[in-house]
Image: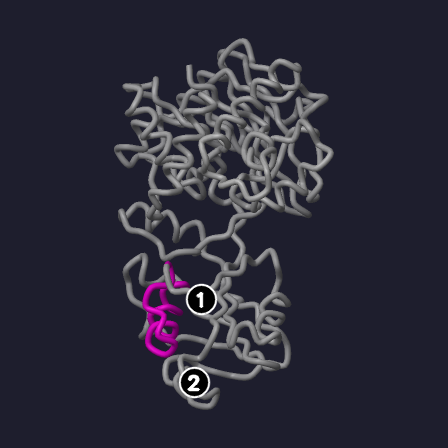
Amino acid sequence: MSLISPFAGLRPVSERAADVIAPPYDVLNSDEARARASGRPWSFLHISKAEIDLPEGTDPYAPEVYARAADNLRRMLDAGVLMRDAQPCYYVYRLKMGEHRQTGLVAAASVGAYDTNRIRRHEFTRPAKEDDRVRQIEALNAQTGPVLLACRSDPGVNKMLARVTEAAPEVDLVADDGIGHSLWVVSERTLVDDITRRFDAMPALYIADGHHRSAAASRVAAGRGLQGDAGMFLTVIFPHDQMLILDYNRVVRDLNGLSPENFLAGVSERFGLSPSASPVSPDGTGSFGMYLPGQWYTLQIGAGRIPDDPVGRLDVSLLADNLLAPLLGIDDPRRDPRIDFVGGIRGLQELERRVDSGEMAVAFSMYPTRMEDLMAVADAGEVMPPKSTWFEPKLADGLVSLVID
């Protein structure tokens, strides 16, 4: 059983790629997707968020949504907007955001490797979200949302990917959000076989984003009796040291009945606390920014409060265990409605805005989780706290899809 395999990708014809590709299905709500797809009949949002083509207010999990997605996929195939490669290929995918570049491999990954934890996870999944992805895959007979994977950086793999990208890409575009997407097709058999061998030599791959898509693919494969290399799921694999994780910040609605003075006193018992004249973007692990109306603070946790285990030493755990739970009474960040999470792409001004508006009482800026820490948690078979990572840039939906034969 190979860890990864080439596949005959379903993708837009080159001149239609800019018309087709879309943000991932789970970063837009229905209204946002409807607006983004307005005037764009070939946008992949008509497949990934097909409720936009049904009356407003339609339940996005209704059977007719999945049926419409399948109809829209057939329409795009019939119109020649989408085509399928004639032979199994790999694809090299480069993302560009500002000065950041990352180059990875689009591949069909083994469901068996996922089931046996060679493709390692670090998050719990929710049944309702899994069910949604299962129904989408079954309706389309395809996997259209790639799972973001990481591999430990390997000089041989990096050199091989660089060699592929010396040629002109098949697709090279900048999406409407300013993110660059470039794609190379790898069909030469010797190179395809070399890629397969190099990845087969790796002990593990790591799910960075896409736990529900991975779990759904496993369920679909089991339901269809697909075993060995027959059970595959759509992935994009990047070397871990090229991936960009932004901060994933926290805002809390109230101070749990404490006055600001008593709250600050409680914080100072657990952290080094100092006011800051400017917004605080932490510069290392164990450091946090905190914003109360009109005032930023720097928080630094003492080394004696940092445990050795891979989950407990994460900054998101240190904040939860030493402040959110004991002072603010937030014992379950996954379910407590008093806490919300703000991706670092929105900037620190979004934290200030939500506190100064009175919507929230306090905000915390975080140092980004490191890929090495994510992999250590996955290697230990542990689960990270919710909202630990915010990856940018996002993969495009619709650039390459995997048909289930």
Residue 17, by quadrant, is top right
Secondary structure found at label 1: strand
Residue 8 is situated, as x and y percent measured from the top left of the image, at 50, 15
Tell me the tag on residue 49.
none
Q: In the image shown, does 372 or 33 lie closer to the viewer?
A: 33
Few, some or many residues within 10 Å of mark 2 (<14, 14–19, 20+): some
Which residue corresponds to the image point at 57% horizontal and 42% vertical from the top-left? 394
Q: In the image shown, does 402 or 257 lie closer to the viewer?
A: 257
**Cα separation between marks 2 and 1:** 17 Å
Residue 119, by quadrant, is top left
Q: Amino acid at mark 1?
A: Ile
- Residue range in magenta is 315-334
Secondary structure found at label 2: helix
Residue 91 is situated, as x and y percent measured from the top left of the image, at 55, 24
Tell me, yes or no, if residue 94 can be seen here. no
Residue 231 is situated, as x and y percent measured from the top left of the image, at 34, 22
Residue that badge 1 annotates: 339
Q: Amino acid at mark 2?
A: Phe
Of pointers 2 and 1, the one earlier in the residue sequence: 2
Residue that badge 2 annotates: 263
Residue 98 is situated, as x and y percent measured from the top left of the image, at 68, 47
Which residue corresponds to the image point at 50% horizontal and 52% vertical from the top-left? 390
Residue 332, by quadrant, is bottom left
From the viewer's perspective, is residue 159 above or below residue 150? above
Which residue corresponds to the image point at 58% horizontal and 34% vertical from the top-left? 54
Q: Is residue 329 magenta?
A: yes
From the viewer's perspective, is residue 295 above or below residue 250? below
